[in-house]
Amino acid sequence: MRICIVNEYFHPDSTGGTGTELSNLARNLCDNYDDVEIDVITSRNLYRTEVTTLPSRECWDGINIYRVATPRPSKTSTKARLAANFLFSAAATLQLLRRRYDVLIVATAPPTTPIAARAYKRLTGTPYIYIVYDLYPDIAVALQAISKESRLTRIFHRMQKTWLHGASRTIVLGRCMQDYLGRHYSLDDRNIQVIPIGSDPELIRPMPRSTRFRAANDLKDFVVLYAGNFGRHQNFDTIIDAAKRIGAVRNDISFVFVGDGAQKEYITNRKVEEHIDNLYMFPFVPKEDLSDLLASGDVSLVTLEPGAEGLGVPSKFYNILAAGRPSIALVSPISEVARVIAEAQCGIQINQADVEKLTSTVIEYADSPELTARMGVNARRVLIDKYTNRHVSDRFMMICAAAVGREALTEAHVLPARTKVEH
């Protein structure tokens, strides 16, 4: 089976986002299935790096990567960003027409990528599978970046509905997203498949809290960890306010922020101006140090803005599960993260602006090591049972087979897992 993945970012991008997730998916499909050939059409840009020298073509251990030269999307101008998005989609279409594939996999980076899939389908009859990581224009409306009533929003909504209904299958990251597409885009549940991001239980494993990261940064207290992007539309005030309250009454609880993003300066300024001495800021760590970093937290934070449930699922949640740590999730009760936490008893859901509840929960967890440890065991168990990368790639392979009219894969088609993963 010849599969082509189209996405703006891809390997060697390993700093998060769709590029990292699709790189992991492609690697797992290529490594675990003996009848799969994978090409990737992507840009020469990296998600968090301004200047790159990526080659126009590369073979990554059997995966052929074709890179098109397109501008980096603007971070400040919506019109310039959309122009760059359309340029990538046009260049990807031209690149697609040079070869023939059995099925395409496209995602929402950039949001216009399905244009290439629709054009290729019309010209060749090739089906496409559409992965919705972040649903546009809906998420931009929910975060008040654009108006719900604007002409651009209405046009993009109609385009999005066309792309969704034209896909052989639409993949979403959670049940909340499945419900949303049914309500807002009249998409039949039979055309939607829920496949979470997942995590690699060999790369990220439960470890003792005496980590290299703790030692290097002299962290000895109970650590509440936030690792990820400091997004422009994320609300960090609830976390900062809780850290400030706790710091006024306890000296054995630290809040540790690791990452980068648009609100890094805002967080830093609040820390300095308000003398929040139990809040620490660090840059991203290399991928190979992620397991060590996640083990450094006694609990980890997951956040999602009000109104964004149904429009995305924080991928960091599954790495926290793999690390065997409880999650404190500042999310809506209907979000996928909240549902998994309730089902697996691996943390707690807290409403996004509830500073008092976050404060009392952190103190409770710090004073209850047995409770924290039990939730961490539950987290690792549910990851192994449901959310490993192998679970994800197996389900994708079944969908690809169905899209091209093949029978469901048998064990003979699947290579054995390289190593056995223990709980």
Image: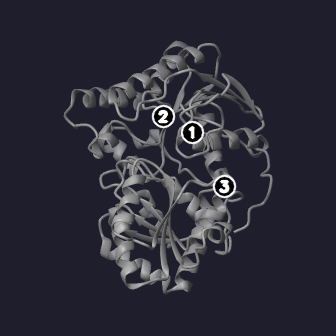
Give me the disc on residue 109. Answer: 2
Which circle's residue, 2 or 1, is located before the other in the chain? 1
Q: Can you give x and y, in whole percent of width and height, for residue 12 in the image?
A: 66, 38
List the residue tagged with mark 3: 200
Its colouring scheme is one colour
Give me the disc on residue 19. Answer: 1
Find residue 318 and report its image quarter: bottom right
Q: Residue placed at 51% from the left, 19% from the top?
A: 121
Can residue 324 be seen?
A: no
Q: Tell us which disc is closer to us: 3 or 1.
A: 1
Find residue 140 and report its image quarter: top left
Q: CA distance from mark 2 to mark 3?
A: 23 Å
Instruction: Give the camera-side residue of 241 and 199.
Output: 241
Q: Can you give x and y, in whole percent of width and height, for residue 363 in the image?
A: 43, 82
Count the labels in the image: 3
Can residue 179 be seen?
A: yes
Position of residue 196 relative to residue 222, above or below, is above
Q: Does dot 1 land on a helix, a strand or a loop?
A: helix
Give the side of residue 220 with respect to residue 247, left or right. right
> In what quadrant of the picture does the C terminus appear?
bottom right
Type of the residue with mark 1: Gly
Q: Are marks 2 and 1 in contact (CB under 8 Å)?
A: yes
Type of the residue with mark 2: Ala
Type of the residue with mark 3: Asp
Query: How busy is the neighbourhood of tag 1: few (under 14 within 10 Å), some, or many (20 plus)?
Result: many
Give the side of residue 48 with respect to residue 271, left or right. right
